[in-house]
Amino acid sequence: MKEHSISTNYIFKGRIINLREDSVKLDDGTLAKREIIEHKGAVAVIGILPDGKFLMVRQYRRPFDKEMLEVPAGIPHQGEDPKEAARRELQEETGYLAKNIYHLSSAAATPGYSDELIKLFAATELTFVGQNLDEDERVEPIPMTFAEAWEKIKTGEIMDAKTIAILGLYEKLGKR
């Protein structure tokens, strides 16, 4: 199966996302429209403290109008290596600098309408150096055990897809 592009119309171009509408032709000749969000891509990182707890962050998320629990994440700076972006985001949001950081996998955030790819990392051998938040960020670091995090997923207190994915990946792949 493949869709063949006929035309693209940009509806919005912003700092982080662009929104476009594509006209496409399906293999059987049917014409269709696709709304697509273009995104620069992101990194997410699960920091593991010496006592085995994970570093989560609580922050307000405007689209849901509530505070949410997530792993630290963000967008790499122009030309920044994703691994270094993960290291930077962990330190900025939690105050911990990682000696070791490694790639677990990558995840398409919402492939039905966005090209955002999130690179997922784990970080170990952490040293506290202090938070370095962006001017408009309000983030509270929260250490928790895997069992606590999994319970919060089951109750819906953690509902962020990248966080659920990275916790599952770390449990299956990441223990090094």
Image: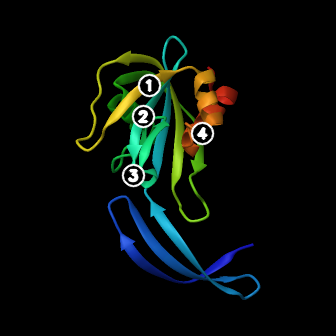
User: Helix or strand or loop: what does disc 1 sit on?
Assistant: strand
- Residue beneath disc 2: 58
In depth, the one of 160 and 132 nearer the eye is 160
The label nearer to you, 2 versus 4, is: 4
Q: Are marks 3 and 4 in contact (CB under 8 Å)?
A: no
Tag 1: amino acid: Ile
User: Helix or strand or loop: what does disc 3 sit on?
Assistant: helix
Tag 4: amino acid: Gly
For residue 156, the mark is 4
Image coordinates of residue 130 in percent, x first then y, are: 29, 22
- Residue beneath disc 1: 142
Image coordinates of residue 93 in percent, x first then y, are: 36, 32
Kindly report the distance in space between the C-alpha atoms of the residues bearing marks 3 and 4.
Answer: 18 Å
Does residue 119 appear to the left or right of 136 in the view shown? right
Q: Are marks 1 and 2 in contact (CB under 8 Å)?
A: yes
Tag 2: amino acid: Arg
The label nearer to you, 1 versus 4, is: 4
Image coordinates of residue 170 in percent, x first then y, are: 62, 29
Which numbered disc flags the more N-terminal residue, 1 or 3? 3
The residue drawn where x is 55% and y is 43% is 162
Does residue 110 appear to the left or right of 27 in the view shown? left
The residue drawn where x is 52% and y is 34% is 121
- Residue beneath disc 3: 62
Which numbered disc flags the more N-terminal residue, 3 or 4? 3
Kindly report the distance in space between the C-alpha atoms of the residues bearing marks 1 and 4.
Answer: 17 Å
The residue drawn where x is 42% and y is 77% is 10
Quadrant of the rendered image containing residue 104: top right
For residue 88, the mark is none
